[in-house]
Amino acid sequence: MKQQVKISKVKGNPNNPRIIKNDKFKKLVKSIQEFPEMLKLRPIVVDEEMIVLGGNMRLKASKDAGLKEVWIEVAEGLTEEQKKEFIVKDNVGFGEWEWDMLANDWDSVQLAEWGLDVWQNYDDNVNKVNTSEEWVGMPEFETKDSGYKAIITFETEEDRLQFAKEINIKWSAQGKGTWSTWWPYKEQQDLKNLKYE
């Protein structure tokens, strides 16, 4: 039965094998602060003693976000073995992301803010920056079409290196788990030393 309770009544599970660290945890706290209604739609699952079976990190993040109450769902009648099974199965990601759809239909900056580890699409970053107050009074400029893009996903680093060797690709930029280049190859433009007058 779903219900809202004081956060102090819910007990974190000391046997929870799942953790979220550093930046990802901060993103979870921010997500809860910005969209606390989501916790009602996806409540923390507890047993009859109010020990968390599913949602330990959401409980911790809710406390850090300053919430006084949380939504819970009480799982009644589970054996100890079923509780252990639930803890693991609740955290297993059976599905995979449809990367092509994410790349084409979603804003990469927003996805990253929501906690998904993704590439940073140049256009999404520029659009976000161009709308900020720091650009008020800056001279207008026309953006050039950045060309056509293809996203290729490799299962292993060896596959990526083999592909680059066979096609004779020289990478012009590297991010976290992403590489980019121009075809035909050209050096990446140095924007760090660009000056405005």
Image (spheres, rainbow, N blue to C red):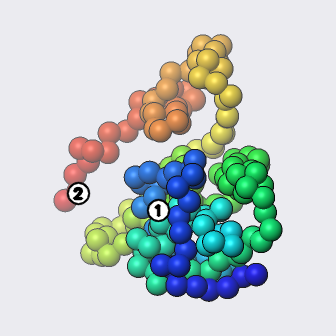
**Residue 85: mark:** none
Q: Amino acid at mark 2?
A: Tyr
Nearer mark to the viewer, of 1 and 2: 1
Q: What is the distance, in whole Å, between disc 1 and disc 2 at their CAs?
A: 34 Å
Q: Residues within 10 Å of mark 1 (few under 14, many from 20)?
A: some
x 67%, y 34%: residue: 153
Does 51 sit above or below residue 5?
A: above
Which residue in the structure is indicated by mark 2? Answer: 196
126 or 39: nearer the viewer: 39
Q: Nearer the viewer, residue 52 or 155?
A: 52
Q: Badge 2, how many Cα within 10 Å: few under 14, some, many 20+? A: few
Which residue is nearer to you in this view: 51 or 28?
Answer: 51
Q: Residue 27: which numbered mark, if any?
A: 1
Q: In the displayed structure, would residue 137 be above or below residue 27? A: below
Query: Residue 141: x and y, percent?
Result: 38, 62
Judged from the image, the secondary structure of the residue bearing numbered disc 1 is helix
The quadrant in which the C terminus is found is bottom left
Q: How far across and how far down the image is residue 62, in percent?
A: 48, 73
Residue name at image x 78 percent, y 58 percent: 79
The part of the image, by quadrant, that contains residue 192 is top left
